[in-house]
Image: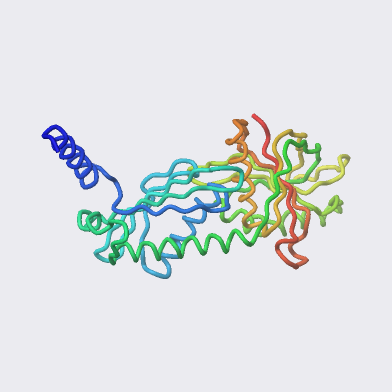
Amino acid sequence: MNNKLKWLIAVVLLSFLGWYFLLKQSDYTITFKVNAATGTISQGIMEWTAIQTKNQNEIYTVIEKRNFDFIKQRMKKGNEELEYTWNMKSINDSITNVSVGIKDLNHSYYNKLTALPFVPSKFKTEQINKIKSFKTGLEDHIGNFKIRIDGEKSSKEIYVAYISLKSSMQEKAQTMIGYDAEIVGYLDRNKIKIIGFRPYLEVTNWDQDKEIVSFNYCFPIPKNTKYVPDDNVKFKIIPAIKGLQATYYGNYRTSDRAWFTLLDYAKQRNIKLANKPLEHFLANPFNGGDDLSWETQIILPFE
């Protein structure tokens, strides 16, 4: 082996070690694939960390979040302090690749040294088991609903009585239920017929960073209905809209999983959508039954 080759090998080795120990952001990275949209996984991460806080006394803080495909968190538990960097990349209409970079802020060099392939370590074993637990819980959740992409569709113009509400994405169904008696009570008191008793949810603003939605909870009524003044209940026309539609089967609490699926579907095809979903609930949850029998049509309008 001549001197030039030796120097080349030495430079490459030193460069790799310098990158690995000084520049590489994570001590260990775990990757896996999930049959779900990026937003569904992002929501799953936030809900999982809330459970970890409750059950394991792990305190998570979001350091950075971009859309639904990147989350950086810091976790503290006693003297332990770790960073989790989640990257979600949609591969196709149904599969998302998830990469989790994990860094122990107190023992990073040691963890990198022992994170070599086929070399077991306490840190690596604990993190693999932890992420496996998350993946199992996520897959169980995904089994609780079904989504069918219907493609390009148009909604019908409808005349509705509505009440304007605002909540986190996780609490929109509970918020609707909480105000159901108010709007239904108004319609009942004033002897206003509800057409079909299949309500709509019309999103007027969706703050994706804060995961807050402003929306109108609507009931279809006859167009010639006389308005009786009320502080909260109003009447309006929801115009016909054209966009991408999906049919969601499952509990209304997680119908936003279809929103995420439509967004990923559109992104794959360079379709521009307005972030104002219109949901039409075709089943009455108060009648009970299997959640998978609850059908919702969801359309995201084109920009």
Total tally of numbered discs in the picture: 0
Work out whether residue 214 can be spotted.
yes
Q: Look at the picture and state if 173 lies above or below 264.
A: below
Q: Quadrant of residue 28?
A: bottom left
Residue in the picture at 58% in, 36% down: 268
Percent x, y for residue 41?
52, 52
In terms of depth relative to the viewer, which is nearer, 6 or 168? 6
Residue in the picture at 78% in, 38% down: 155
How has the structure been colored for display? rainbow
Q: Is residue 235 left or right of residue 140?
A: right
Percent x, y for residue 101?
36, 51
In terms of depth relative to the viewer, which is nearer, 133 or 243? 133
Percent x, y for residue 181?
72, 59
Q: Quadrant of the C terminus?
A: top right
Residue in the picture at 30% in, 50% down: 26
Percent x, y for residue 286?
75, 65
Q: Quadrant of residue 82?
A: bottom left
In terms of depth relative to the viewer, which is nearer, 18 or 239? 18
Q: Look at the picture and state if 282 lies above or below 159.
A: below
Q: Quadrant of the N terminus?
A: top left
Work out whether residue 231 can be spotted.
no
Q: Is residue 195 left or right of residue 8?
A: right
